Amino acid sequence: MDHPYLEVRNLIHEYDGKRVLSIENLKIYRGEIFAIIGPNGAGKSTLLRILNLLERPSHGEIIFRGLVIEPSTDKLFLRRRMVMVFQEPLLFNGTVFENVAYGLRVRKYPKMEIEERVNRLLMKFNIHHLSDRHALRLSGGEAQRVSLARALVFEPQVLFLDEPFASLDPPTKEALREDLERVIRGMKLTTVYVTHDRTEALMLADRMAVMDKGEILQIGTPEEIFNYPVNERVAGFVGVETILSGTVVSQRNGLADVVVTGGRVEVLCESSVGERVLLCIRPEEVTLQGAKDEGRDMISSARNRFLSVVRKVIPQGAIVKVRLDCGFPLVSFVTKQSAEELDLKEGQTVVASFKATAVHVIRK
């Protein structure tokens, strides 16, 4: 991989003597989409402002294309190579075309180049037909498309996005996310994207960082972070619904028995007997079948099978979340069709199962 395009070293940031950021190292590479995810108050937006040179950190270094940003550095020169798009579109009283063209006119670009750049971006974001529309009369999705076009018309080197889809309805959000990714990939634009929506990050990012309480807990590809969280805080944020604390009681060729409160779980891990571990089980890995089917000659590779009581059934569109008690709490996602076929209801007994390979083990 190339040298970092944007880098943070030994960053500490404080407000009124209170530390809000503490980041030892963060590297973002040219042309990648890098997502920063975490709960509200994690420090994501503060970090974004520092990366965008809008705030100076209390301590530490920001390096842009190998240049350490010093107090004497011409930040205006660098900021003109960066753009930032916020959650709420910031449009002024005028047409869509005028909004997108405004910055170019201020910088005295030639008229023909302004028209060519603006029309190209309007086409890319599928809003060319809105060119003469009053910008303050647009829908939320249309307004955000204009805001993105206005940012990218400068052909920046780095794009910063601060929760750009947070106020949009799901269909509008999905359509805009797909168009934005297409435009970013086409421009090979280095992008830093802040969100608390893990699904967005999973769909969009090449790499991501999980933040909480001003610290980066883990950096990796979406697959690495979602499937192999490094600790309980990361696991909980990326959608691991079942996290069990237990002790390894047997170990044979990488297959271990772990005793948890209320049961015993088989997992693949190299932990030693007596070692304390956390077991992370994603809900989509837990399958359900009717209790009356237990004992039949059913083909299953799942080593973990538990007679369970349904405690709560929570419809979530096409998916149904099922909270179970099988001696320990367990959560499963099933399709709406499966839930109807099983006739799932509170108090019902079912068999919950998952493979030993589906359990991610965090060694304490």
Image (cartoon, grey):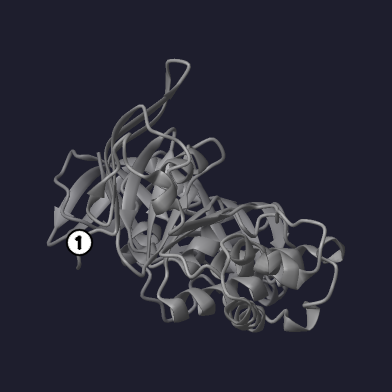
Whether residue 35 is visible to the viewer of this picture, yes or no, is yes
Describe the element under mark 1 as helix, strand or loop.
loop
Q: Which residue is depicted at the point 21% across and 44% down? A: 249
Judge by depth and name the residue closer to the eye, 15 or 264: 15
Q: Is residue 1 above or below residue 260?
A: below
Q: Position of residue 12 (x, y in %)?
A: 33, 30
Instruction: Name the residue beneath numbered marker 1.
Output: 3
- How crowded pointer 1 is (Cα within 10 Å; few <14, some 14-19, many 20+) is rated as few
Q: What amino acid is labelled 1 in the image? A: His
The image quadrant that residue 278 belongs to is top left
- Pick the residue in front: 117 or 7: 117
Name the residue rendered at 46%, 56% in the picture.
Answer: 80
Location of the N terminus (image quadrant): bottom left
Q: Quadrant of the C terminus?
A: top left
Residue 344 visible in the current orientation = no
Left/right of residue 64 with respect to residue 40 in the rendered view = left
Q: Is residue 294 left or right of residue 230?
A: right
